[in-house]
Amino acid sequence: MRFSHHRRALLSACLPIAIAVSACSQSTPTPPAAVTPAQTPAERGKVLVQVGGCHDCHTTKKNNEPDMSTMLSGHPASIKIPAAPKVPAGSPWIVQTTGTLTVWSGPWGTTYAANLTPDPDTGLKSSAWSEDAFLKAMKTGKHIGTGRDILPPMPWQMYAQLGDDDLKAIWAYLQTIPPVKNEVPDPIPPAK
């Protein structure tokens, strides 16, 4: 009786260990890796536009929120902005903006956020723009790739660091958004 009691105690102590060792020694199937569907260039471009903060300046604000009904259409032509006040000499302030964040003024003059929609008359579908011109503009800081300087606050220097595939993805996305007819004013040189 003593032997069987001792044997039972030994078995009850060793059995869980044996089961655990057996379970560990068996190879457990590895779950298949999650397959991420490939993004289209336009989907990639949408991410880059969002992460790049393009809506901050190129989408006007309504109640302090981006007005997505005019998404990326630049400074609204319907909002006339008086000349920016000249910053007094010695002032620590050198940049001014409007509540819409679509107009900026500083030592370079006054700039208006461009219409990035594919409107054929006032946006990136106009005859002046092409994918090639867009890439050149983002890489050289020249409007339409060969024109005047792209002025602050547009961070073209940051976009110039992107590869062609990413810039082409941004272009592809901008071609998919709703076109908005909006003639943005030309920049104003600095006051003399």
Image: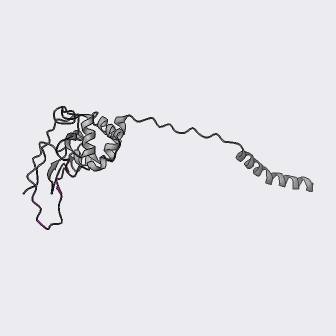
Asked whether 6 or 184 is in front, the reply is: 184
Asked whether 43 or 155 is in front, the reply is: 155
The boundaries of the magenta stretch are: 84-105
Q: At 85% from the left edge and 52% from the top edge, which residue is drawn?
A: 8
Where does the image place residue 62, in percent across and percent down from the top left?
20, 47
Q: How many marks?
A: 0
Q: At 66% from the left edge and 42% from the top edge, which residue is drawn?
A: 28
User: Taking 14 as reference, is 162 left or right?
Assistant: left
Quarter containing the N terminus: bottom right
User: Taking 172 as reference, is 26 left or right?
Assistant: right
Q: How is the image coloured?
A: one colour
Where does the image place residue 64, in percent across and percent down from the top left?
22, 51
Q: At 21% from the left edge and 44% from the top edge, which residue is drawn?
A: 142
Asked whether 15 or 128 is in front, the reply is: 128
Residue 73 appears anywhere in the view: no
Asked whether 106 or 36 is in front, the reply is: 106
What main secondary structure does the magenta stretch of the protein show? loop
User: Taking 78 as reference, is 172 left or right?
Assistant: right
Where does the image place residue 163, in percent across and percent down from the top left?
35, 42
Residue 92, compared with residue 9, is above or below; it is below
Quarter of the image for residue 108 reads bottom left
User: Which residue appears farthest toward the bottom when viewing the image?
Assistant: 90
